[in-house]
Structure formats: C-alpha cells, structure tokens
Image: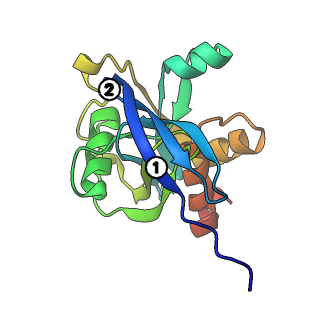
Amino acid sequence: MPPESPAPRIRSTRTVHDGWASFLIADVTLPDGHAVTREIEDHGEAVAVLPYDPERRVALVIRQFRTPPFFAAGLPELLEVPAGLLDEADPQEGARREAFEETGLRLGPLDPVATVWTMPGVSTERMHLFLAAYAPADRTGAGGGLAEEHEGITVLEMPLAELAARAEAGDLSDMKTYTLLLALRLRRPELFA
C-alpha cells in the first residue's frame, strides 16, 4: 500500500488589501510537502438565477458594463443572468432579491441547479445557481439595479432559442449564464424546440 500523503496545510496568511474583496497571501504546505505561496481573493458567496417564461419561451437577462472584461478584452458590456453577492443566510432569498433589483421580477419557487466554485485557483467564491419560471405579471418593478451601486443595467427579454444560438456560436461569454442556459436545455428541452 502506498504511503499516505500528508494533508495540505495553510501555515499563515496576510491581508494585502481589504475592500469590497479581501486579497490575501497564503503560505501553504502542499500534500507533497512543498512550501508555496498562493494568492486568495475573498468576497463571500454569490447567487445567480436564469428567469424564464415557459409559455412564451423567453428569458430575462441583463446587459451591463463590467470593468474586468473591458480591461482584459475591451468588451463594453456583458450579457448575463441576474446575479450578485449573497447577503442573506438563504441563497434562494438572495437570488430573489438580485432578480428583483436587476430585472424587476418577483420570483416564486426556484429550481436549484448547483453550488459551484467560480474560480477555485484564486477565489473563495461559491455561487448558488438557480432556474426560475416566471410570467409577465411577475414583473412588478423597473429593474436596472441599484442607483447607488451605479450598475447601469439594461434588462432584455430574449427568446430562449436566440440565447441557445448565441451559446452555440460562442457568443455567450459569461460562464454562469452559459451554465444556467445549458441546465435549462437539459431539464426542459421542449422550450428550445
């Protein structure tokens, strides 16, 4: 029987920035015994939801400016599902809050998809992903995000078939949106026929 590898261990951390997110440097002992330094970005858990109308076969998505994609690739805006940091104890309540703030939708039951590590090589963020059916009467607010957060969100109602075509063409570059669209296609393929 091969010898058991020692457990990895974080020997120490130091915070190098503490703002919206904290950035830490960790001194780590790997399972093979090597000592390394790793960077950690920590801002808490997040939620994302794909609201879709099964009768009209559309989804509510948003467009907004995101600084990192603009910096890295010159993208002036990103097409994505409503999402944000989790402030509540219950991820479903957080997803409902984000959907209302960003799209004006009051969502009822949510269909959990997964809880995933978004960037496990650098970030502590775990994102709770949901699908949620809605009807036109559920859109009771304006959406657009919070003014004090300068989100500048544009709400779009798009045919599910168009979103799927964008994904197939490689034009849907936000991972949470792509993942939730694929989950909906697997669970409800008739909506894309």
Q: Kindly indicate the quadrant of the structure image that contains residue 43.
A: top left
Q: Foreground: 157 or 120?
A: 120
Horizontal arrangement in the rendering, residue 155 relative to residue 36 (left or right): left
Q: Kindly indicate the quadrant of the structure image that contains residue 31.
A: bottom right
Residue at the (59%, 37%) spot, across then down? 174
x and y percentages locating residue 117 in the rendered image? 51, 51
Q: Secondary structure at mark 1?
A: strand
Identity, as a three-letter code, of the amino acid under mark 2? Trp
x and y percentages locating residue 178 in the rendered image? 61, 46
x and y percentages locating residue 38 in the rendered image? 55, 37
In this view, which residue lies farthest toward the bottom? 1
Horizontal arrangement in the rendering, residue 43 relative to residue 89 (left or right): right
Determine which residue is flagged by label 2: 20
In this view, which residue lies farthest toward the right? 169
Residue at the (25%, 18%) spot, across then down? 147
Q: Kindly indicate the quadrant of the structure image that contains residue 32.
A: bottom right
Within 10 Å of disc 2 (Cα), the crowding (few <14, some 14-19, many 20+) is few
Residue at the (23%, 18%) spot, across then down? 148
Q: Secondary structure at mark 2?
A: loop
Identity, as a three-letter code, of the amino acid under mark 1? Ile
x and y percentages locating residue 118 in the rendered image? 53, 46
Instruction: Using the image, tell me which numbered label, if any, was put on residue 10.
Output: 1
Query: Vertically, is 43 above or below 161?
Result: above
Q: Is residue 22 visible?
A: no
